[in-house]
Amino acid sequence: MATTLLQITDVSDTTGAACCTPLTRETIDAGRAQALARKLKALADPTRLRLVSIVAASVGEEACVCDLIEPVGLSQPTVSHHLKVLMDAGFLTRSKRGTWAYYRLVPGALGELSQLLDVTASR
């Protein structure tokens, strides 16, 4: 049996990390609000939420675009568009193998977003 080492991202310490300070702790500036809104908008689509879930639950936390078409019931160009939105928002990375693209979650991207919204972290 092979051992797989996973990268660990510490999201518990937000001191000095402006990207991770909960929204309830300090007022955010317009630039940060715009960046956060873009991330939230990317996830505010049911298809994109499903795609993130499918990629995260896939073997090796990676999925080929060819394996994402059937589960969401959309055409390949539409699925690719949704994946691009998720990549642009910083949730997925893409690697190309032959003619197919493979997608993987960016380590810590969802945790960072959840920490921003965690109102208990500001207490």
Image (cartoon, rainbow, N blue to C red):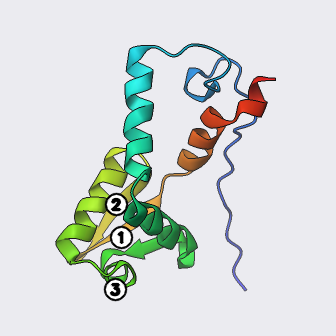
Q: Are marks 2 and 1 in contact (CB under 8 Å)?
A: yes
- The amino acid sitting under disc 2 is Arg
Q: Looking at the image, tell me whether mark 3 or mark 2 is earlier in sequence order.
A: 3
Q: Cα distance, mark 2 to mark 1?
A: 6 Å
- The amino acid sitting under disc 3 is Glu
Instruction: Look at discs 3 and 2 and give the one toward the viewer.
Output: 3
- In this figure, which residue is indicated by the disc labeled 1? 102
Q: Looking at the image, tell me whether mark 2 or mark 1 is earlier in sequence order.
A: 2
* Element under disc 3: helix
Q: Cα distance, mark 3 to mark 2?
A: 19 Å
- In this figure, which residue is indicated by the disc labeled 3? 70
* Element under disc 1: strand
Q: Residue at x 42, y 74 (%)?
A: 63
* Element under disc 2: strand
Residue 3 at x, y = what percent? 71, 74
- In this figure, which residue is indicated by the disc labeled 2? 94
Quarter of the image containing the N terminus? bottom right
Q: Are marks 3 and 2 in contact (CB under 8 Å)?
A: no
Residue 12 in which image quadrant: top right
Asked if residue 9 lies left or right of residue 59, the reply is right
Q: Nearer the viewer, residue 9 or 72?
A: 72
Q: Are marks 1 and 3 in contact (CB under 8 Å)?
A: no
Q: Cα distance, mark 1 to mark 3?
A: 15 Å
Disc 3 crowd, CA 10 A, few/some/many (<14, 14-19, 20+): few
Q: Nearer the viewer, residue 99 or 30?
A: 30
